[in-house]
Image: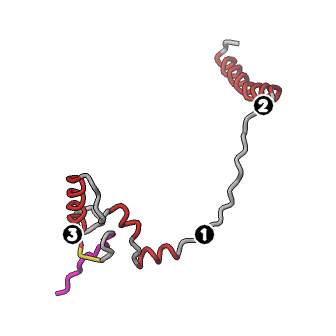
């Protein structure tokens, strides 16, 4: 009789393991989680981080999976658009913008009041 095992990928040790070796809902295996907790406990106890710093070690790690993902990245060559201030400094144009936006409001209010029989 053949049994099918569920395999999961551990993001810390970069290995595929059975799902029984993982805590529920986590992407790192029990062994890596325990090692992280011990490292964190000892770092907090003496107040100084040791050379096995989990924040920097994960950034410096170069696994074959990460190298492949980095090589497949597409350079988009995005051209930056220079910033332009969109402020209206002319008083005449500010007045015309105000009138242009208030005109529909006045018309709508007039139509509503006319339908209610108040005008």
Indicate left or right for 98 with 75 as reference.
Answer: right
Where 34 falls versus 82 (above or below)?
A: below
Q: Quadrant of the N terminus?
A: bottom left
Q: Which residues are magenta?
A: 1-11
C-alpha span from label 1 to label 2: 40 Å
Q: Is 4 within the magenta?
A: yes
Q: Position of residue 73 (x, y in %)?
A: 54, 71
Residue assigned mark 3: 31
Q: Quadrant of the C terminus?
A: top right
Q: Position of residue 40 (x, y in %)?
A: 24, 58
Toward the bottom, the furthest residue is 1
Where 33 falls versus 46 (above or below)?
A: below
Q: Position of residue 91 (x, y in %)?
A: 80, 26
Where 70 falls versus 102 (above or below)?
A: below
Q: Residue at x 50, y 73 (%)?
A: 70
Q: Position of residue 104 (x, y in %)?
A: 73, 27
Q: Is 47 within the magenta?
A: no
| Residues tagged 1 and 3 counted as in contact (Cβ below 8 A) | no
Toward the right, the furthest residue is 92
Where 6 falls versus 1 (above or below)?
A: above
Indicate left or right for 33 with 115 as reference.
Answer: left
Toward the left, the furthest residue is 1
Disc 2 or 3, which lies upstream in sequence? 3
C-alpha span from label 1 to label 3: 37 Å
Q: Nearer the viewer, residue 67 or 48?
A: 48
Residue assigned mark 2: 89
Q: Nearer the viewer, residue 25 or 66?
A: 66
Residue assigned mark 1: 75
Quarter of the figure with residue 89: top right
């Amino acid at each position: 009789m053949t049994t099918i095992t569920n395999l999961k990928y551990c993001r810390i040790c970069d290995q595929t393991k059975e799902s029984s070796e993982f805590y529920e809902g986590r992407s790192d295996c029990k062994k890596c989680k325990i090692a992280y907790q011990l490292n964190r406990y000892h770092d907090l106890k003496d107040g100084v981080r040791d050379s096995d710093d989990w924040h920097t070690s994960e950034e410096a790690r170069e696994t074959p999976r990460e190298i492949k993902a980095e090589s497949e990245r597409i350079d988009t060559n995005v051209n930056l658009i220079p910033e332009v201030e969109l402020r209206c400094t002319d008083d005449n144009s500010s007045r015309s913008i105000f009138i242009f936006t208030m005109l529909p409001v006045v018309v709508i209010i007039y139509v509503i009041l006319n339908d209610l029989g108040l005008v």
